[in-house]
Image (spheres, helix red, strand yellow):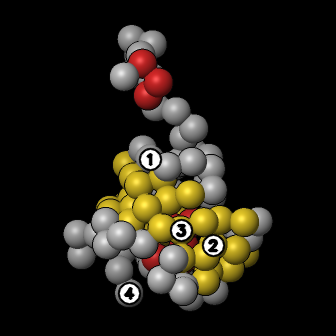
Amino acid sequence: MSFWNFLGRMAISDEGETIQRISDTTSVSSDGTTYTTLGNNTYGSDGSVFTQTGSFSSDGSTRMGSSATGLGAVFNKLDDDWPESLHSSSGIGDDDF
């Protein structure tokens, strides 16, 4: 099981895999897998399915603040860790580029 850290809209594993959050419901992994979240379930284009309950996922992983103990917990939504938009102190955000 991999260990994940969250940096803005991106999660990075200790194995070098990344997941970029594209929207509230869609994320894309560096291995090409697209994940779609519907309610408490996340479906991967590779056939994977994760169900979230609180900070736990059906794959046995858990989310603690800005880290997760496995892939399934990456999709447990905590608004502070996956912001809608990244804004700097200068007032420039994602949409300005």
Cα–Cα span, label 2 and label 3: 6 Å
Q: Residue furthest top?
A: 90
Q: Residue at x 24, y 75 (%)?
A: 15
Q: Is residue 86 above or below residue 20?
A: above
The amino acid type of the residue labelled 1 equals Arg
State the mark number for residue 9: 1
Q: How many marks?
A: 4
Q: Is residue 27 shown left or right of residue 18?
A: right
Q: Is residue 16 above or below residue 10?
A: below
The amino acid type of the residue labelled 3 equals Tyr
Query: Counting residues from the N terminus, which is met first, the one under dot 1 or under dot 3?
Result: 1
The answer to whether one can see residue 71 in this image is yes
Cα–Cα span, label 4 and label 3: 18 Å
Tell which tag, 2 or 4, sits nearer the viewer.
Answer: 2
Query: Counting residues from the N terminus, which is met first, the one under dot 2 or under dot 1?
Result: 1
Cα–Cα span, label 2 and label 1: 17 Å
Q: Is residue 40 shown left or right of residue 22?
A: right
Residue 66 placement (x, y as % from top left): 46, 56
> Which element carries disc 2, helix, strand or loop?
strand
Viewer-nearest residue: 38 or 10: 38
